[in-house]
Image: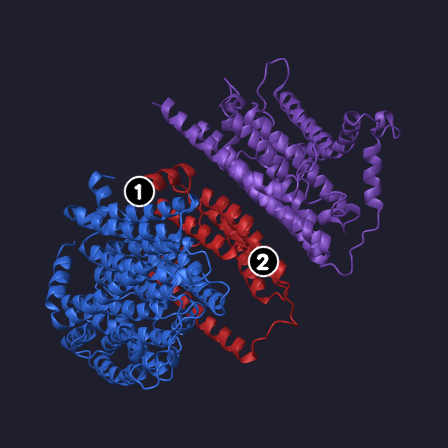
Chain colours: A red, B purple, C blue
Amino acid sequence: MGTAQILFWSLTALALISAIMVLVSKNPVYSVLWLIVVFFAISGHYILLNAQFLAIVNLIVYAGAIMVLFLFVIMLMNLNTETEPQKSIWMKFFGVVAGGLLLSFFISFVISSADLKGKSAQLKEGEIGLIKTLGKALFNDYVIPFEIASILFLSAMVGAVVIGKKD
Amino acid sequence: MQHIWIVLGVLFVLLNIAAGLIWLERRMLAMWQDRLGPNRAGPLGILIVLADTLKLFFKEDWIPPFADKWVFITAPAIVVASVLMSFVIIPFSPSIIVSDLNVGILFFLAMSSLGVYSIVLGGWASNNKYSLLGALRGASQMIAYEVFMGLSLMGIVMLTGSFKLSDIVNAQKDVWFVFKQPVALVIFFIAGVAETHRLPFDIPEAESELIAGFHSEYSGMKFGMFFIGEYLGVTLISAMTATMFFGGWLGPAFLPPWAWFFIKTFAFILFFILLRASLPRPRYDQLMETGWKVLLPLVLLNLMVTGAIALWIRG
Amino acid sequence: MTEQQLMALLPFMVLAAASIVIILLIAFRQGHTVIQVTGFLLMCLVIFAMWYVRGVLPQTIAPLLIVDGFGALFTGLIVFCVLVVGLFSYIYFEEREENPREYYILIFLSTLGAAILTISRHFMSFFIGLELLSISLYALIAYLRTRNNAIEAGIKYLVLAALTSAFLLFGMALIYMETGSMDFAVIAQRLNAAGKSSALFLTGFGVMMVAVGFKLALVPFHLWAADVYQGAPSPVASFIATVSKVGVFAVFLRFCQELHLQNNSAVMMLISAVAILSMISGNILALRQQNLKRLLAYSSIAHFGYLLVAFLPGNNTGVEAAVFYLTAYAITILAAFGIIILLSPGEKDADSLSMYRGLFWDKPFMAIVLTVALLSLAGIPLTAGFIGKFYVLTAGVEQRAWLPVIVLVITSVIGLYYYLRIISTIFADSPVTIQKERSLNQFFYTASYAALVVLTLLLFGIGVMPAVIIQGIKQFLVIDR
């Protein structure tokens, strides 16, 4: 297997195992830490696809800022197994069954889709992931959703201040 | 093959600088505070480095039984790892750079974002009120000042047109960016001091206010790691300031380029130590208010003005 | 961007500017009244801007937006609803101690989100509009944060909306994987070129239906509706019931029309199943409700079930019937919630049915408006609701979709029970007077009464002479593509 293949499969394994550990951890802080590992693995995948900007910004925004805020909230909430209501074992069982069915649907559709057969992990080349290309596309074709996204941030800020301020 | 030598060389030099800073800081602090500092161990007290390191190595490695073991152990490792990773992009000389990434500055910002985790996790894992308080305050301070740090660098990116640090150094061949972006320099430096939580922004440690803040429960080599991380952070911010604003390895030809780089970096390291010797510590709310209400508008204004002037110059 | 494209976007830019103007007014410490009046005038300005730019329509602003007659129709409906909601909010918030000025910012931003949904022709603008709409709503629902149910309702909406947004993105990713594009028109082309029906597309569409079903409160994604309607402030509940649903329905309708999904039997089976379940459960769940806001929530579920029956055929009659029904429904809900707002005393909302006992003897005007609104919801002749249902039935029968039509008729009859129960409570004997301190602006009370009069007259007018509206709708729908 070439380097690309090894990297791809190891990053995939890391992402999947960490994602399962997010669900399975008893301590919510551990779940957050495993989620951060998942984000690192996904950033690795982005780098394999030559989406450099996306990889780094994923790290800065997701792993660097959002997860810190998650940690804040979880630390201040002080969750314990004793004080939290436990779900019944039947709910967990049926949850796993339903999720597993959905997963098998998706996998079967993806595998049977004709143009994905036979392709294995490849490195992507070319210009498309570079910041320059992204910047040009963002400010020429997609400038309207860019502006609307800034309005989205405004509404989130106003909403957060309205709910959160004390008076 | 040559690459491995570069990596090993950079690592060696950095760790030596971090260790040497133990001595340098204590001597310079002493000099500015009108006293002697360590002068017993070895000539000029230089063997104090060896003494401190041996002491930390041989101390009992005690993990408090009420602490969360794995997170407790990982927290100091995170800060050292992320700061060392940030050195990957810094150009020591035209040929000595570990990896000249296309997204150099963004990589630096990503690694400094990861540095927040060491404080938060260290404070939480200690299972101690003071640590948690220091940790939360420190984390909010670091997240806030990260924003300003990133934005202040964007003015330089606009002038250079690239995120690569080697491009930025090359763009300073005729005039250093300190003359083109003075406001950005001030804001970047202030934010950098806050990021490495040095005085006057050392609320996370807050000696004599919060016991020892987020590293109250740490002893031995883990404590040593936090300190190495802090000194490496100081070196990193000094190196970045030298690279981004003062021309990096550029300088007259009578000294090799890496010498110029080290001279500039050391100048800023000394400035860091001077700040510690002279300034009082502001209150936490004053810190946050100044950040969001003064620095953020300033840095956005800087960005707008830089953009306007750049467009005007380009015709 | 050409000048014409900028002109076509003018109403939306005015809408965005409206929230900035309100922010500046708050910064300059203006009072509630000034902000209310300014907001009202700005919404009128938006309608004027829409009339002003009608010459340049339709404009395609590649790759995300298309401003055409379809979009203009729905945006007009949305802005009308926000006008009325904004007017009613003044009375409601004057009597509560929370600072109501930021409420207007959030309402206008939410409206902008819904408006973007109506003109979107690309998955990205679909998502951005949806998020803009939802995020403002999170804060609006929990606005009166010291009340009992407000924060609970806000959290329920937040968690569920975020979850379904994730589903939406996943569905969009699957469809993108299948067709290689996010543009509705290009997706339609590629699907037709592929010939056979694609399983991946069906899965993606099914997953996207989770998000659409959540926003429209269709079964089985309807569990949030009753709690959120009850916990949110009444103007916000009326906003959710009208504007947010109209926006999402508009983009869903556009998506299905562009892709000619009516020919896809699997999708149609899915939608009829959802419609039938919504009609049945909406009506049955409302039967034992004692709380008027929850009852309106459940009846909204049923009404969107009826609406989907009109949506099934996909021919022109179907689309017109759907738009007409939506208009009639919006006017009715605004009238009903208007009554609830005007009757709400300072602390609680007037949502318990016992508060309406003998309303006719105490406040006859309000009782009549509420009765007309309920009759319209039930689909009694002479009201707009009847014409709407009639059209829906016509469209359904034309397409020979027998099962949904039969279920529609049966559940409408079942629904009649709880509407008539409320009406009989209103006309019952022992009057209970709701004490209210009328210490406020008589002007705004008069304005709200005037709005209610207008709404009632519209209900009757549309019920008796629907041709005007239907002609208008036909005209709008012609000026596109």
Q: Amino acid at mark 1?
A: Asp
Which chain hosts label 1? A
SS state under label 1? loop
Q: Is residue C257 above or below residue B104?
A: below
In the figure, is residue A104 to the left or right of A79? left
Residue tagged 1: A141
> Residue at image x 18%, y 47%?
C52
Which chain hosts label 2? A
Q: Residues within 10 Å of mark 1 (few under 14, many from 20)?
A: some
Q: Amino acid at mark 2?
A: Val
Q: Could you tell me residue C108's position as x and y percent?
A: 34, 53
In this view, the residue in front, C70 or A54, is C70
Q: Could you tell me residue A93's position as x and y percent?
A: 53, 77
In this view, the residue in front, B253 or C152, is C152
Answer with mark 2 or mark 1, whichever residue precedes in sequence.
2
Q: Residues within 10 Å of mark 2 (few under 14, many from 20)?
A: few
In this view, the residue in front, A69 or C290, is C290
In this view, the residue in front, C46 or B198, is C46
Q: Is residue C120 above or below residue B226?
A: below
Residue tagged 2: A73
